[in-house]
Image (tube, grey):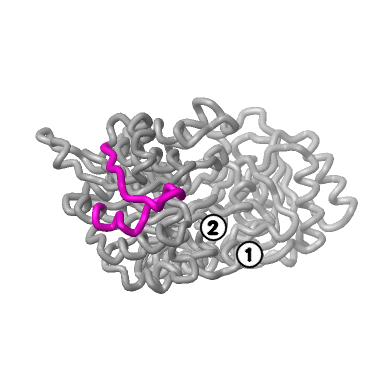
Amino acid sequence: MDFPRLVTSKEMAQLDQRAIREGGVSGAELMERAGARVVEAIRQRWEGLEDLEVVVVCGKGNNGGDGLVVGRLLRRAGVGVQVFLAAPRQAVQGEARYQLTKMEEAGLQALPLLGEEDLLALGRALEGADLAVDALLGTGSRGAPRPEFHRIIERLGQAGRPVVAVDLPSGLEADTGQVPGACVRAVLTVTFGLPKIGQLFYPGKSYCGTLVVADIGLPVPVPGPETVHLISGEEVARLIPRRPPDAHKGSCGLAVVVAGSAGMTGAAALAADSALLSGAGKVILGAPASLHDLLEVKLTEVMTRPLPEVRRHRCLSLRALGEILPLLSGAQCLALGPGLGRHRETGELVRRLLGRAGVPVVLDADGLNAFAGQADKLKDCPAQLVLTPHAGEFARLSGMEMQEVRRDLLGAARRFATGHRLVLVLKGAPTLVALADGRVMVNPTGNPGMATAGAGDVLTGLIAGLIAQGVTPESAACAGVYLHGAAGDLARNQQGEWGMKAGDISRALPRALVEVADCS
């Protein structure tokens, strides 16, 4: 899998220095390229530059230097521009000072933005502007902006004008996505070289608007352990299995789904049907015997198997192990957990089954709950594991507090995946896929309408169906979360976020597969 990198501010600075040191390009030239990309993004977004009035707000650092280039290039294109500088002129140094001088030589002066009167002048300028460009704070910014910057950011927000952020919105932490104080809310963010981690994590993602990644000629980052990557449609397209002309159901893989209990037949049906919709040739659903007839009605194309159950509780009993193992003899994957319930005997069945499965296992929901407080037992499992918890399930499984998980999603997911030698799909906004080698993949697809019961069951079946078709568990997890989100986006576009149900996501999977496959 060759997904593009997400970088920290430190890694980005290192790439800048490599470009200067090894590529023979100056810092001033990188600024020139960055400013030109912002101007081009504005041209495309506003369908030309004619008759625009633009206010550019610059800081004293490199981000401000990029903004000074934007101002000069817009002026050269005939745009009405006012540039404000939130620092004394003498405080601007290095390449940014060079760009300031160059802008002044082109006949455009930077207006001071230092005191209350200057803030009033900024407000008047914004009233007559079509848009503003934010080049105040760069990727190195940490913590809440200082009071003088806070006031400027507030004034940009109060003006009600669309804002284009240079590299990232001022006030957003590039490495975490946290917004510890005032933050510019952009409609368009033009970031350079590679996307930053904080631009994909909430709340930061919601402040970026449309994210455009602009090439300014930076070198390719050096591969290494514990890197973070962005799942891309182009790469997922290459992971989707293609059927040969002589394909038949036996050659397209068999997925076994073990799921369901009283009141939770929907989870079992969604997981099994989604495995089939992903392209698996055959799917067998094993469920408690008393629920078999109901599932026969729910599912037409999925084969069902009644399994021994705990009397009166209508959930799987330990005796089901002897009937599940023969089902796995011809299977390529087992999906285990949706709607199983938390009866102690069902939990013991899950733990014993994992020790003898012999095929890759996608473990979800109550399958995960069977290992709450016993996660170390997963290290002894001989099968390749893909775990698909949401944050609450992950907290129970790992023994961490929920706040601790949310404070460091990347680190928590990475440590668990490497420590237990498995693939961890940590569902959320965004969903992460952590691999045993330390890499973490971030999924960009999906929307709030997918916050609905059963959506996770669809994902479980989808990943299992891809593995059944011969996709490796690592690749199936990455492709699965991307396709799952893409299907959710299609469902949202069709009917909006409020009324979306898990079945709508499942039914959109075939179209999502077609559209993503066409990216290759």
Q: CA distance from mark 1 to mark 2?
A: 10 Å
What residue is pinned by disc 1? 403
- What's the magenta region? 303-323
- Residue 131: image quadrant is top right
Circle 2 Cα neighbour tier, 10 Å, few/some/many (<14 / 14–19 / ≥20): some
**Along the viewing direction, whichever of 187 and 462 lies nearer the viewer:** 462
What residue is pinned by disc 2? 391
**Along the viewing direction, whichever of 365 and 108 lies nearer the viewer:** 365
Q: Check residue 29 for magenta coloring.
A: no
Q: Position of residue 242 (x, y in %)?
A: 21, 40
Q: Which image quarter holds the N terminus? A: bottom left
Q: Position of residue 415 (x, y in %)?
A: 45, 71
**Along the viewing direction, whichever of 451 and 261 lies nearer the viewer:** 261
Question: Which comes sooner in the sequence, label 1 or label 2?
Answer: 2
Considering the numbered disc 2 on the image, is that residue within a helix, a strand or a loop? helix
Q: Residue furthest left?
A: 246
Q: Is residue 93 left or right of residue 47?
A: right
The amino acid type, in three-letter code, at marker 2 is: Ala
Tell me: residue 26, above or below residue 298. below
Q: Position of residue 159 (x, y in %)?
A: 79, 40
Q: Which image quarter holds the C terminus? A: top left
Q: Residue at x 77, y 58 (%)?
A: 149
Q: Residue at x 46, y 50 (%)?
A: 313
The amino acid type, in three-letter code, at marker 1 is: Gln
- Residue 496: image quadrant is top right
Q: Position of residue 167 (x, y in %)?
A: 57, 53
Q: Check residue 312 for magenta coloring.
A: yes
